[in-house]
Amino acid sequence: MRPDKIHRNVTLERMVLDFWQFVRSQRMATRRLGPQFRRSRRLVEIDITYRCNLQCANCNRSCTQAPSKRDLSTTRVAAFIDQSIAAGARWKRIRLLGGEPTLHRDFFAILDQLMTYRRAYRPKMRIVVCTNGSGPRVRQVLSHLPNGIEVKNTFKNGSQRLFRPFNKAPADSSLFRFSDFSAGCRVLKDCGLGVTPLGYYPCAVAGGIDRIFGFGLGRKTLPSADDTLRDQLAVFCPLCGHFGFSWPTKKVKLSPVWANAYHRIRFSKPSSFTHPRSSSAGLKKSQVDGEFREAST
């Protein structure tokens, strides 16, 4: 199903909302009014692969900055479905992302798993494939999508578009010194719970950050209804350029904490990392339960 127009991540409306989120997330505001955003109980994004056929600057899954062939297995997708059924989850929308999701070798098997779940338990649930729409292989896969699958297509062609500067960590800027990072951002509301090869997160972006920094904080099973995941937000939001307002750019922008993290990835194995603003500093990759450590293929 081809959309009527190109999906764009940077719009004037979103920039205004981001500026308001920056104001609303100040500690004084959240103490008085409570957090503006809460983790979703209705929307899900599943990062099924970190493979990608493009090299977009500021990729918020670090597919360009730190390429990986890590995939989410069909076994883990089945576990998510089983846990959703057991919990009585009422998902309204599930998105498949990456990376470029159509590059997953079991892409159609994963679609079949989700469609089977939808038929049996959530007949009105939307299943959406988020794609860059670029290259013959990707377009061939998209041309064979079964009926009932929606497409969110950015129609990228290799030329750099405007991005939020994901790799400008708020922790590296004094502008955010009064921010309550556990308040999250609109990604929680717009995108939903993140299911990634490393576990469950308040958003899939957080899972991509954890892949680089190696905290190993992903939940190993579907979070319970009363799990706010704010402990994860307090760790990952200070590292994420989606938190608060930043001018969009086409250029590579790296703040020091990200430059150091990518340097470690390129020249050594990830190890313990001292988080700039979190009591969770020093968690080691070896502390992670191996259940969600999918093998690279």
Image (cartoon, rainbow, N blue to C red):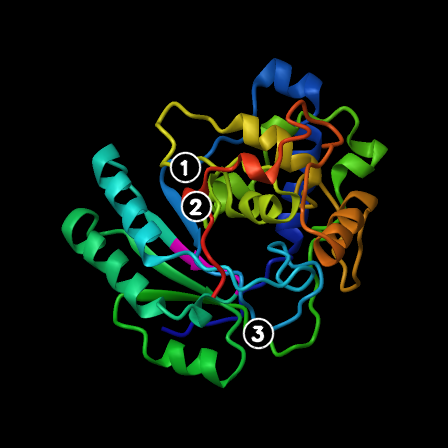
Mark nearer the N terminus (1 vs 2) = 1
The residue beneath circle 2 is: 292
In contact (CB < 8 Å): disc 1 and disc 2: yes
Label of residue 220 in the image: 1
Quadrant housing residue 24:
top right
Coordinates of residue 43 in the picture (x, y in percent): 39, 44
Q: Is residue 22 above or below residue 135?
A: above
**Relative to 143, 178 lies left or right:** right
Residue 244 seen: no
**Does residue 290 show up magenta in the picture?**
no
| Residues drawn in magenta | 95-99
Mark nearer the N terminus (3 vs 1) = 3
Q: Is residue 12 above or below residue 4?
A: above
**Relative to 179, 222 lies left or right:** left
| Mark 2: secondary structure | helix
Q: Nearest to the eye among marks 3 and 2: give it.
A: 2
| Mark 3: secondary structure | loop
Label 1 to label 2: alpha-carbon separation: 7 Å
Tell which of 284 and 254 is nearer to you.
Answer: 284
Point out the image quarter for the N terminus: bottom left
The residue beneath circle 3 is: 53
**Relative to 79, 120 lies left or right:** left
Q: Main secondary structure of the magenta part?
A: strand
